[in-house]
């Protein structure tokens, strides 16, 4: 896909500021915030009050804190509390948490209008912080009796502050703080956020701070955290019974409201407005039905929290722009959700694509016998790492039906553009980058607009030549018949000619297992099944007699006249045989005369068809071949092919094709040519191996020319 510097809107996932929090309430959580603000009015002169808002990461806790603060700000001046913000995540040092905590409180007090009382309370807090050390505090012990500390900081500032207050002991310091806070007389509400971003020891330290100052008058604490994370952090800090420990510290624990279906839909609609309008164009038939199926398969239910929605659509906007027009929009939405909610499953998809989409043309290894159990175990393990494995399983089934039923695949669906096809999944995983991607917009244009075919063929690299043919066939298979009216005949002719293009030939020669012309013929046969039966013979005649499609013509002739009982739909008529063979032999001879016969992807098949159908012409053809070194070497390499050794690779021997060779020349004359060719010291190892096999009748390895022992 082409790169672009166009601005791409990304949601920054920042909660609304305090000033905007109430107006930005999209999830109707104001009532929840008002209830908590009311609870904070319990803070009084005799004891403090600690409240926790508990919810998973991304559930909107910070937004609710901002709403609560906005409500408290709106209280009358006479009752409005002093608001203190403390974010332990920004401190970065667990040993500095306590000092910074008191410093923040003191700073807030000094900004109030009750100047004398506020400054006195602030000074007491600063002094108190310098004589208060929680490092040796054992959870559950009496806080004041167990932590008396004599000498304070090495700088002496703590001693000086204590001396100024004439408070040598911790209890006396605490009493001074209590007296100053009661004299100050106003509530102090401390907002503590991002506790669940701390390391376990820092979490423990923060909770101990809240516990240690939990009985100071007029102070209320509202802390937002992920309950599960905090409990796990306490366990890692060797705190027994973390649930009970939290209950001793926090007087009121409140769970965040879950994301309602209506709230989720509102957030999704908001995010969809940020998607490029071009993403919604009808690149594929029934794309709207595919999107509606997202609700049927509960795909959006995976978005548990507001942050999930934002993150999923951030992923989508980047991914969609990279692969636009290659995969149906609905599948990109679902896969983006999987990436943020089922990372373990996405890793498994990348590692074992075949389990999810089956084989591609690139995947020429054996079958998957025995892989079923491994797939089941691996998938179960990946699902176990997800928060909602049962829903993730449904989404996988929606995107990749093959993973649960090997009889199904995305290609069985009536809708085109699903991610569950090998080529499309590759594009999504690579995000449209690299030469191995088949652009489906090009596929559509290639099929429906014959004027663009030469340009598009020129852009197809060798690495995707087979995939290009396969995706053309799939497009034809899924497209509406009315859309294809009048284009299939010309399309088949173009594809037959493409099989002898330079890039296709390069790809075919790299593949030692499948034959390029047979791959192309298979695609043509599939497409031709959409053509009216009475039109097939005319199409076959045109392809078989054309000088531009000799390789596919050789496969077509072989299928039509050497295997008359085959099941191929594309066949030449018996009455056209003489005309076709005459044209074919003429085309082959003409290519040999100009020295280009060996450039065909189906050179070997051409030789076999000539020996079977027109043996009388073969000697004349060989006379042309032997006078061209490139064609002569290609002739021997093709007919001395003896298969592949799983350890040492390609082998060469004439023993399997002696009858074919003798249609062209005698074995003696070929051995005479071998003696001359073997004198060439610059010959490549595989050519030398093939010629040596001709010379002495033995088997040789192409990689180094050594003899293959039977």
Image (tube, rainbow, N blue to C red):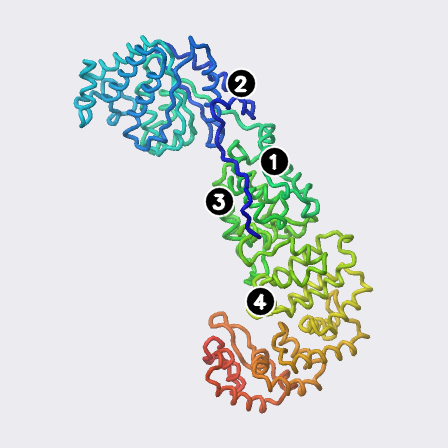
Name the N-terminal-most of marks 4 and 2: 2
> Which disc is residue 31 wearing?
2
Query: In 3D space, how far apart are the residues under numbered discs 4 and 2 (Cα atoms)?
Result: 66 Å
Q: Is residue 564 above or below residue 404?
A: below
Task: Determine the image quadrant of residue 189.
Answer: top left
Q: Residue at x 29, y 12 (%)?
A: 178
Name the N-terminal-most of marks 3 and 4: 3
Query: In 3D space, how far apart are the residues under numbered discs 2 and 1 (Cα atoms)?
Result: 28 Å
Determine whether the residue tagged by mark 1 lies in a helix, strand or loop: loop
Q: Nearer the viewer, mark 1 or mark 4?
A: 1
Name the N-terminal-most of marks 1 and 4: 1
Q: Residue 267: x percent and y percent?
A: 57, 31
Name the N-terminal-most of marks 2 and 3: 2
Query: In 3D space, how far apart are the residues under numbered discs 3 and 4 (Cα atoms)?
Result: 34 Å
Residue 150 falls left or right of residue 65 = left
Question: Can the viewer see residue 654 in this picture?
Answer: no
Query: In 3D space, how far apart are the residues under numbered discs 2 and 3 (Cα atoms)?
Result: 37 Å
Q: Nearer the viewer, mark 2 or mark 3?
A: 2
Determine whether the residue tagged by mark 4 lies in a helix, strand or loop: helix
> Which disc is residue 233 wearing?
none
* Residue bearing mark 1: 273
* Residue bearing mark 3: 344
* Residue bearing mark 4: 507
Question: Can the viewer see residue 439 in this picture?
Answer: yes
Q: Nearer the viewer, residue 246 or 544?
A: 544
């Amino acid at each position: 896909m082409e790169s672009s510097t166009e601005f791409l809107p990304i949601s920054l996932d920042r909660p609304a500021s305090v000033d905007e929090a109430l107006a930005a309430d999209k999830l109707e959580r104001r009532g929840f915030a008002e209830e908590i603000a009311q609870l904070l009015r319990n803070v009084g002169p005799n004891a403090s009050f600690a409240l926790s808002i508990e919810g998973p990461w991304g559930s909107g806790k910070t937004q609710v804190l901002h709403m609560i603060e906005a409500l408290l700000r709106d209280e009358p001046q006479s009752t409005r509390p002093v608001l203190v913000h403390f974010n332990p995540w920004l401190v970065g040092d667990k040993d500095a948490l306590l000092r910074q905590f008191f410093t923040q409180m003191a700073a807030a007090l000094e900004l109030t209008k009750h100047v004398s009382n506020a400054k006195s309370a602030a000074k007491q807090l600063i002094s108190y912080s310098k004589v208060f050390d929680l490092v040796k505090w054992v959870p559950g012990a009496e806080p004041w009796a167990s932590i008396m500390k004599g000498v304070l900081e090495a700088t002496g500032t703590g001693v000086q502050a204590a001396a100024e207050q004439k408070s040598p002991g911790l209890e006396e310091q605490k009493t001074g703080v209590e007296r100053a806070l009661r004299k100050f007389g106003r509530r102090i509400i401390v907002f503590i956020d991002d506790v669940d971003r701390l390391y376990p020891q820092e979490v423990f330290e923060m909770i101990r701070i809240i516990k240690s100052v939990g009985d100071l008058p007029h102070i209320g604490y509202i802390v937002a955290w992920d309950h599960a994370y905090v409990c796990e952090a306490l366990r890692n800090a060797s705190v027994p019974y973390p649930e009970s420990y939290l209950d001793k510290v926090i007087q009121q624990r409140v769970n965040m409201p879950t994301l309602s279906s209506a709230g989720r839909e509102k957030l999704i609609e908001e995010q969809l407005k940020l998607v490029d309008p071009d993403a919604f164009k009808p690149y594929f038939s029934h794309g709207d039905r595919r999107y509606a199926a997202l609700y049927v398969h509960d795909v959006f239910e995976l978005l548990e929290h507001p942050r999930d929605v934002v993150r999923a659509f951030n992923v989508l906007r980047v991914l969609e722009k990279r692969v636009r027009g290659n995969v149906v929009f609905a599948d990109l939405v679902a896969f983006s959700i999987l990436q943020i909610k089922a990372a373990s499953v996405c890793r498994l998809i990348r590692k074992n694509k075949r389990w999810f989409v089956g084989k591609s043309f690139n995947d020429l290894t054996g079958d998957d016998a025995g892989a079923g159990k491994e797939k089941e175990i691996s998938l179960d393990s990946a699902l176990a790492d997800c928060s909602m494995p049962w829903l993730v399983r449904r989404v996988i089934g929606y995107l990749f039906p093959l993973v649960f039923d090997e009889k199904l695949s995305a290609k069985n669906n009536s809708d085109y553009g699903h991610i569950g096809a090998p080529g499309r999944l590759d594009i999504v995983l690579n995000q449209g980058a690299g030469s191995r991607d088949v652009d489906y917009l090009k596929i559509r244009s290639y099929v429906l607009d014959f004027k663009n075919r030469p340009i598009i063929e020129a852009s197809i690299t060798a690495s995707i030549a087979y995939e290009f043919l396969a995706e053309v066939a799939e497009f034809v298979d899924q497209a509406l018949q009315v859309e294809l009216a009048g284009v299939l005949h010309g399309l088949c002719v173009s594809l037959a000619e493409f099989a002898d293009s330079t890039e296709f030939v390069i790809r075919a020669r790299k593949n030692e297992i499948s034959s390029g012309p047979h791959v192309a013929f298979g695609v043509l046969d599939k497409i031709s099944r959409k053509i009216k039966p009475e039109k097939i013979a005319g199409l076959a005649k045109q392809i078989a007699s054309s000088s531009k499609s000799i390789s596919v013509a050789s496969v077509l002739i072989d299928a039509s006249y050497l295997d008359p009982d085959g099941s191929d739909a594309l066949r030449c008529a018996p009455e056209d045989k003489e005309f076709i063979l005459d044209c074919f032999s003429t085309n082959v001879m003409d290519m040999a005369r100009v020295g280009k016969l060996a450039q065909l992807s189906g050179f070997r098949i051409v030789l076999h068809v000539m020996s079977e159908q027109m043996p009388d012409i073969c000697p004349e053809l060989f006379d042309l071949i032997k006078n061209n070194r490139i064609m002569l070497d290609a002739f021997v390499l093709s007919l001395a092919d003896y298969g592949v050794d799983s350890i040492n690779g390609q082998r060469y021997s004439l023993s399997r094709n002696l009858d074919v060779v003798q249609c062209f020349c005698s074995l003696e004359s070929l051995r005479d040519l071998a003696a001359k060719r073997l004198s060439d010291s610059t010959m490549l190892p595989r050519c030398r191996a093939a010629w040596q096999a001709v010379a002495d009748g033995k088997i040789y390895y192409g990689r180094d020319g050594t003899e293959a022992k039977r």
